[in-house]
Image (cartoon, rainbow, N blue to C red):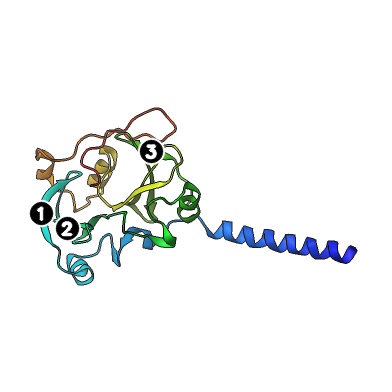
Amino acid sequence: MVKKMSCGLSLTLLFLCLWSTICLAAGKVVDEDFSCKGVMLGDSESILRAKWGEPLYDKIVIKQGVKVKTYVYKDRSEASIAVRTGEVVDFTVDMEKYTARDNVRKGATKFWLEKVYGKTNKQFIEGEYYLIYTRENHPHQKLLLKVDGDDGHLLNLQISSLPIDEAERAAMAEAGDPILLEHDRDDDNGFAGIDMSNMPQDKEVHLEGWGR
């Protein structure tokens, strides 16, 4: 009997140790999360073309107050290049087809998202809920997860280094971020003001031109 109890206790302790190890290792963004199909935010246009191939077409637009050239591909993926710097600043994907790290895909549960990326407060943007993560040492590179307001499952994913509100834009301008162009601010399709607040506060964020 004592031997069985000892064996059971040993198995329980082993299970707890393994569970603790899993919990400690989980829940953190990594550099890979700020890339899409082998291309990182900040990579050059030549790297994008080498890895993604030729797009169906491209277009010049003002996106979040930054003039970009957006390449649109057959699988509905889009990659935007800052016109001034030639660096990749934004990815949007078709979530019906796209799978991110650790099998994160459309429909991924709140539990799985937190296990992979960690916990963060939801933010309310134009009637939708988002989890927003930033890359270490790159505060303006963001992973944006659009989630269901009720159970928190994943609806959409975007990777971007474009400013999401006036405060971030001001910080980028003060730091001399080269993707910002002074004349873009006067463009009719340029950046609109955003009031961003962390949930669960009852404040709605107004965000124009974000996502698809």
Within 10 Å of the Cα at label 3, are there few (<14), some (14-19), or many (20+) other Cα atoms?
A: many
Q: Identify the residue at horizontal 77%, vertical 64% (top origin).
A: 10
Q: Position of residue 120 (x, y in %)?
A: 45, 44
Dot 2 crowding, Cα within 10 Å, few <14, some 14–19, many 20+: some
Looking at the rendered image, the quarter that the N terminus falls into is bottom right
Q: Secondary structure at mark 1?
A: strand
Task: Check disc 3 and report its element: helix, strand or loop.
Answer: strand
Q: Which residue is mark 1?
A: 59
Residue 78: quarter of image: bottom left
**Which residue lies at the image location 23% right of the left edge and 58% below the top edge?**
77
Distance between the alpha carbons at the discs numbered 1 and 2:
8 Å
Quadrant in the rendering for residue 53: bottom left
Q: Which mark is residue 72?
A: 2
* Residue at mark 3: 123
Residue 176 lies left or right of residue 100; in this view the side is left
Is residue 21 toward the left or the right of residue 1 in the image?
left
